[in-house]
Amino acid sequence: MTPMPADKAPTTISQGSQTKGGIGESTLRPDGTLKVTGEFAYSSDMWHEDMLWGQILRSTVAHAEIVSIDTGEALATPGVHAVMTYDDLPTAVRHYGLEIRDTPVLAHGKVRHHGEPVAIVAADHPETARRAAAKIRVEYRELPVITDEASATAPGAVLVHENREDHHARHVPHPNIVHRQPIVRGDAAAAARRADVIVTGDYTFGMQDQAFLGPESGLAVPEEDGGVHLYIATQWLHSDLRQIAPVLGLPEHKVRMTLSGVGGAFGGREDLSMQIHACLLALRTGRPVKIVYNRFESFFGHVHRHPATLHYEHGATRDGRVTHVKCRIVLDGGAYASASPAVVGNASSLSVGPYAIDDVDIEALALYTNNPPCGAMRGFGAVQACFAYEAQMDKLAKELGMDPVEFRQLNAMEQGTLMPTGQRVDSPAPVAELLRRVKAMPMPPERQWESSEGADVRQLPGGLSNTTHGEDVVRGVGYAVGIKNVGFSEGFDDYSTARVRMEVVGGEPVATVHTAMAEVGQGGVTVHAQIARTELGVAQVTIRPADTQVGSAGSTSASRQTYVTGGAVRNACELVRERVLETGRRRFGAYHPAWATAELRLEGGKVVTDGGEVLADLVDVLEGEAVEVEQEWRHRPTEPFDRRTGQGNGHVQYSFAAHRAVVEVDTALGLVKVVELACAQDVGKALNPLSVIGQIQGGTVQGLGMAVMEEIVVDPATAKVRNPSFTDYLIPTILDTPTIPVDVLELADDHAPYGLRGVGEAPTLSSTPAVLAAIRDATGLELNRTPVRPEHLTGTV
Amino acid sequence: MDFLRPASWQEALAAKAEHPAAVPIAGGTDVMVEINFDHRRPEHLLDLNRIADLYEWEVGEESVRLGASVPYTQIMENLRAELPGLALASRTVASPQIRNRGGVGGNLGTASPAGDAHPALLAAGAEVEVESVRGSRRIPIDAFFTGVKRNALAADELIKWVHIAKADGPQQFSKVGTRNAMVIAVCAFGLALHPATRTVRTGIGSAAPTPVRAKAAEEFLNAALEEGGFWDNGRIVPPSVAAQFAQLCSGACNPIDDVRGTAGYRRHAVGVVARRTLAWTWESYRGARRVTEGAA
């Protein structure tokens, strides 16, 4: 991989430039070495004396009434301490959910998808628990399966959820539709009449899995006050807490939660998995209970990315101006709502991409089906749309005989452009510039596989499998650009809390930062320390483990944590600084007039004036006293989208990335080697340039996986998952990972802390359509579906 | 589950005679997956890791005697000249960690149609030496695979050696999968030229209930090469002959549609790699001939 050239690294730092390890530097992760050497403790590594092992029994069918459950034999198994079903739940609250509480803790009367939890077992050995679970006899009466829009809305279709009472229920055209969001701006029908060229397309997006490497796991420890302490790998402690406590019948303060080592998330840990189950078993048995999924169970234990079908119509005038877009996006939400409503909001509001288009007619909806539940995953609704609108932009360019990059640049949005929702983009939107940069990068040399010793198969499609030595290999190049919102949208109160303390420890000023932010690998722990160093001018920063002893930090998702929790940390640091300076003025103000007259900063452990004069050592100012602040922090509020027109200032911030993909395709075997995936992205301000590059490269590879290999295959006849393992759910290896040169642009967003822009998701959007465009370029095929399989490239579907 | 740990080959044979249902385990590539997924719960596991013989190989005049547990890494690194097809196949097995533990004996024991070694063994010509307390016998590779994940072993027999003819000509191996490394074969193809007998042998993986040879294709090609005097004149194999050979290789497949690929793709892909591996091996044969002639 090509690191960011040194001259691209940001050099200006807004505050505290004399303090080493502040923002803008590529300080190293505190957990980096431990992770690389295998010593980092993940949630699955936890152990407690006397602990029991929990096991979940899951449904073997996708849709069925439960006729009976017989737990007798399981309970009688030596070593088993508890078996619980729906009837054993302790309170009347027996469902949970992120937005809609439609998910039963354990199945009640009915199962709605393959792998739904039906019963739980605690035993003194994991194998005993597993065997006991297998002895629970569940009698099912199978129901017809709802698997797509046609079966969901057919006359007389079985309702996946009867008697819906959620806040979307009154507004949807059919009870098997979770949520529907139209967006209408301008007059698409009239604009279509001005179009010289109209292209339409039907696109299919497969079901992607987050494929985080650390499977779901946690440890619940009963406490003396009747409560429980849950050590858990999650994305949002307080959201979990809000859903767990009522089911247990406990007040929230009796459910303590501590984040344990998280092995990746990508959205897959936004919903609960084994949290409630472990707590229930711990409270029932009075013993600590640990649950760890294996990979097979993990595929059933978390939501996936919504598969989608998308219909688009684009028009343009002969001179290359897009006249209008009409589109309809149908997302498969699976059996439970999870994050579907918010995914619909994103898919609809971001459905035309980063382009200035005034006349749009948009509809997005999510279905209830009996397929696996789908929810949050990196890119969150914007990914599916980007795959389709970028295919459309290429189609239009081709129809007009224009260069696809120039055509995009001609229609690119910029600061001030109105979104389909009517929201004005009020910070830099360098879409044309990102495309220019990615196009200007040098092309990788042709035929890199050729060497004096024959073909280097590692450089060829098929890799080490030795399928071609250059025969039928054709190069293709493709471009794509995308737009992603940052932060939670549609009026959500998206705040974060930070507690910052400054005191003298061992003769040195030390800052302690305490938040409930889930570190899932994104690097928040690194960035928080950098912010504290910059704002407080100290070298030593302690990051406290995340737990619920401090207020909510919101979710580690939506590219929001550096913005929102980073913003909260900065805000708390500023308040601490003010109090420190107040103390300083009180103690030393009389000795130097600058205390009263100058702008003061904390730098290098000292109080200094803006002119650089040192007024005091922090050690002397603090004099054994600790200064501590806990404060919530909010970004600008957003508004809901109007249910009929979709109008509203629904998003906080937008982020943009562009990709150029260079692929080589073995056209006879339909195998693809992605040679290079160049990316240009505006990040506003790179707080940690190395982490920024890591995020961009990681997102790029996740998009590549979606383009050529990653898909959960569900049998349409039974709604059962066919490939729940890493044997058949393929994710890219290092040999599939191309060179990823990254060009980082830093155009400040004045509304955001330090001008930063959320980074994590945008690169996942444009990567997939860029690869698809490159494969189309190489093969001349239309390719309306992703991932592309060899069958699609060889006509052997 | 009992874990039997024989210290010697004789003890292993005795254990297998006493517990014919015992499942032998060496690298554990297949067995551990089956146990972890609860697909199999044998009463006895027969651990062969203490039996040093199984990790040895011997290069003889005509053939290589390969211990059942010799790891793929060793084959790749040490037997490339003698067993080029198998060395290429070994390089496509899973990941480096698994190649350090897994061996051909496990592939044969599982007898999966997707076993990476099988097409190379079929093409090279091999015999599997199996033994029990009753004695030993050699099973020709052509008679070894008897059904889906079934082989010709009796319940009390263990695989000890695989005797593989030393390459007398170029060999190739291609595996088709949707990832560039660490992938289970959607289909695979092995091809070996045997100038000594003026024959060509093939092996097809993952495209029929068992690994198979494309016998009609071999016979066609043998006849075409003989008829045109190609073994002597070293001329390029005409495209029409290569195409017919490829088509017959596709015809030898009897594949299924599954989550890894369609039957139609498998048939098609086997044809493509049959044509390519023929071109590579034949080019290499012609090159070798020219070198030999030049030296003479």
Image (cartoon, coloured by chain):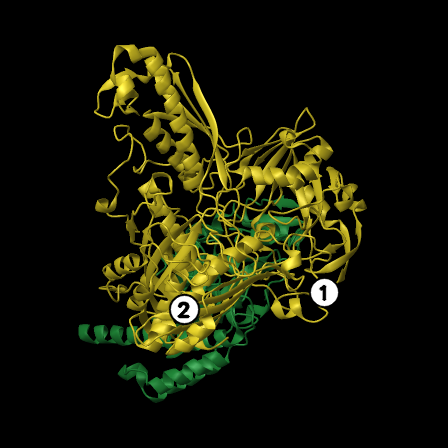
- In the image, A376 versus B101, the foreground residue is A376
Is residue A129 shown above or below B217? Answer: above
| x then y, percent, for residue A210 | 50, 52
Q: Which residue is mark 1?
A: A158
Q: Residues within 10 Å of mark 1 (few under 14, many from 20)?
A: some
Q: Residue under mark 2: which chain is it in?
A: A
| x then y, percent, for residue A485 | 44, 52
First in residue order: circle 2 vs circle 1: 1
Is residue B149 shown above or below A569? Answer: below
Instruction: Identify the residue at the far bottom of this view.
Output: B227
User: Do the CB atoms of the residues marked 2 and 1 lie less than 8 Å apart?
Assistant: no
* Residue A131 visible from this viewpoint: yes
| x then y, percent, for residue A636 | 44, 43
Q: Which residue is mark 2?
A: A391
- In the image, A361 versus A17, the foreground residue is A361
Q: Is residue A135 left or right of residue B146?
A: right
Q: Secondary structure at mark 1?
A: loop
* Residue A789 visible from this viewpoint: no
The amino acid on which the numbered mark 1 sits, given as a three-letter code, is: Val
Quadrant of the image occupied by residue B237: bottom left
Quadrant of the image occupied by residue A575: top left
Colour in which the image shows chain B: green
- In the image, A178 versus A479, the foreground residue is A178
The amino acid on which the numbered mark 2 sits, given as a three-letter code, is: Ala
Colour in which the image shows chain A: yellow
Q: Is residue A600 left or right of residue B252?
A: left
Q: Secondary structure at mark 2?
A: helix
The span from disc 2 to disc 1 (Cα, nearest Å) is: 35 Å
